[in-house]
Amino acid sequence: MIRKELIMFTDKFLEVLTHEGTVSITSWGNEEPHVTCTWNSFLVLKNDNTLLIPVAGMHGTESDLKVNDQLILTLASREVEGFNGYQGTGFRILGKGEIISEGDYFDEMKEKYSFIRSVLVVTVTDLKQLL
């Protein structure tokens, strides 16, 4: 059995999520990198290294994930103190993505966000504070 290493969602990361900000989602398939965005408040954390993100559009991301499941996400907040008293902090998340349109995660997110057509499920493989 392969053991999956758990990534800790740190207290600082959780604090950033309590403030609104932009989440940048970068994917790449056979073409150039594709970047789309969502909001900090739309991220739903699960206790198993999983982030759920509501999807209304994200057609480019979906196409890329069919070729390459790797994602880079960044998010930040100026309201949360960073390293050495810096005004603001941010994080980089590396992970594997999948777009789903059925199942428990989809049902959970559809109830919370009625506008969605699907859910981006991100399995976090690395979480790093940048500032």
Image (cartoon, rainbow, N blue to C red):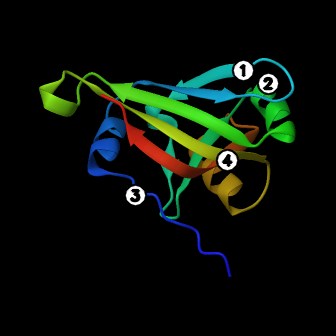
Q: Is residue 85 left or right of residue 95?
A: left
Q: Quadrant of the N terminus?
A: bottom right
| Mark 2 burial class by Cα count in 10 Å: few <14, some 14-19, many 20+ | some
- Residue pointed to by mark 3: 8
Q: Residue at x 59, y 48 (%)?
A: 52
Location of residue 27 by image quarter? top right
Residue assigned mark 1:
34
What is the C-alpha distance between the residues marked 2 and 1?
7 Å
Q: Secondary structure under badge 1?
A: strand
**Mark 1–mark 4 distance (CA, rounded to whole Å):** 15 Å
Q: Are marks 3 and 1 in contact (CB under 8 Å)?
A: no
For marks 2 and 3, give the one nearer the viewer: 3
Give the residue pinned by disc 2: 60
- Residue type at mark 4: give it: Lys
Residue shown at 37%/27% (left/top)? 76
Instruction: Compare marks 1 and 4 and give the one earlier in the sequence.
Output: 1
58 w.r.t. 114: above or below? above
Q: Which residue is mark 4?
A: 96
